Amino acid sequence: MSEAGRGHLAMLGFAMLVSGSFSLGAMAAPFIEPEVLNAVRFLLAGAVLWGWALATGKVTRAVFDAPWRYFVLAGLFVIYFVTMFEGLKTAAPVSMAAVFTLNPALTAVFGYMVVRQVTTARMALAIVVGGVGALWVIFDADLAALMRFEVGRGEAIYFWGCVAHALYAPMLRKLSRGESGIAFNAGILTAGSVILCIWAGPGLVAMDWAALPMIVWWTILYVALAATGVTFLILRYATLRLPAAKVMAYTYIVPSCVILWELVLGRGVPTAMVLPGVALTALSLLLLLKDEEKPQEVTAA
């Protein structure tokens, strides 16, 4: 399999892992503040990755060069999470999810601005097709709901979080200096832990940890180890092998993957009307599988 093919396969796994955090997060949300949960997930994931990096001899002096890089990348994710939860105070989840589908297009813009990656006509078509399919799934095939969409204060706040999220992929490519992916991501998680612990400090102290139901602990373990630690490694691996726009295009299949998680968890069956949207997201990925660019040099991950 080519390096690009491995990148696509990695991003399919990324989409499934990220999707699980939505379903589990919805079950845990009533019992814990989101910023507190995210602070714990970053701390746990960072500790695991540092242990892994040390055990495998991946920690070298180069990892500690220019530590500001970790805070830049971690800061982008913190901005994304903070604005997402702030936006959800006033905006409906459906509207927020619609804003999230802007990420691939935003990433294509930043990919060009930061590392001069050009989006081909095929990639642009895939972004459009995938966006239409994702919206169809997100709005549950309800055209009336789509037509009523209005951008409110919450959506506007979250938009800037999506800008930060989209900027992450090309910035990661630009700031990476060939370090071990494990150690590099451990550094990002550590920087994110510092930022989030300052942000969620009072909540962390006030939380009655012993009273939390098991679903919260299972969710923390999942989002820390799978949806944070593993996906950080996957994202770095794929970003070094695929253009940023292709990496972020996998955003479009997250709603469809969430449907699968909801079925497995017994939380509802989607109507047949959403299947055309699922088909369009699959079509967008098929369009992305054709590599129109010259093979690019791959930095060791």
Image (cartoon, rainbow, N blue to C red):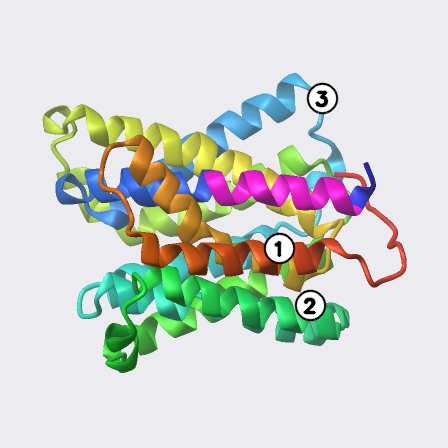
Kind of residue sitting beneath label 2: Met
Looking at the picture, tell me which residue is in the foreground, 149 or 221: 149
| Cα–Cα gap, marks 1 and 2 | 10 Å
Q: Is residue 267 above or below residue 157?
A: above
Q: Position of residue 45 (x, y in %)?
A: 46, 33
Vertical relation: 38 (above or below) 88: above
Q: Does the segment drawn in magenta span residue 154?
A: no
Camera sees residue 170? no
In magenta segment, residue 15? yes
Q: Tell me which residue sits at (35%, 69%) in the image.
A: 158
Q: Which mark is residue 285?
A: 1
Q: Start and end of the magenta stretch?
A: 4-16
Local SS, label 1:
helix
Instruction: Using the image as rendered, state which of residue 232 and residue 55 is in the foreground.
Output: 232
In the picture provided, is 104 more to the left or to the right than 208? right
Single out the mark in the foreground, 3 or 2.
2
Q: Quadrant of residue 160?
A: bottom left
Question: Which label number is shown at residue 123?
Answer: 2
The residue furthest front is 272
Measured along the vertical axis of the image, is residue 269 above or below residue 85?
above
Q: What secondary structure predominates along the stretch shown in magenta?
A: helix
Q: Which mark is residue 57?
A: 3
Position of the C terminus by quadrant: top right
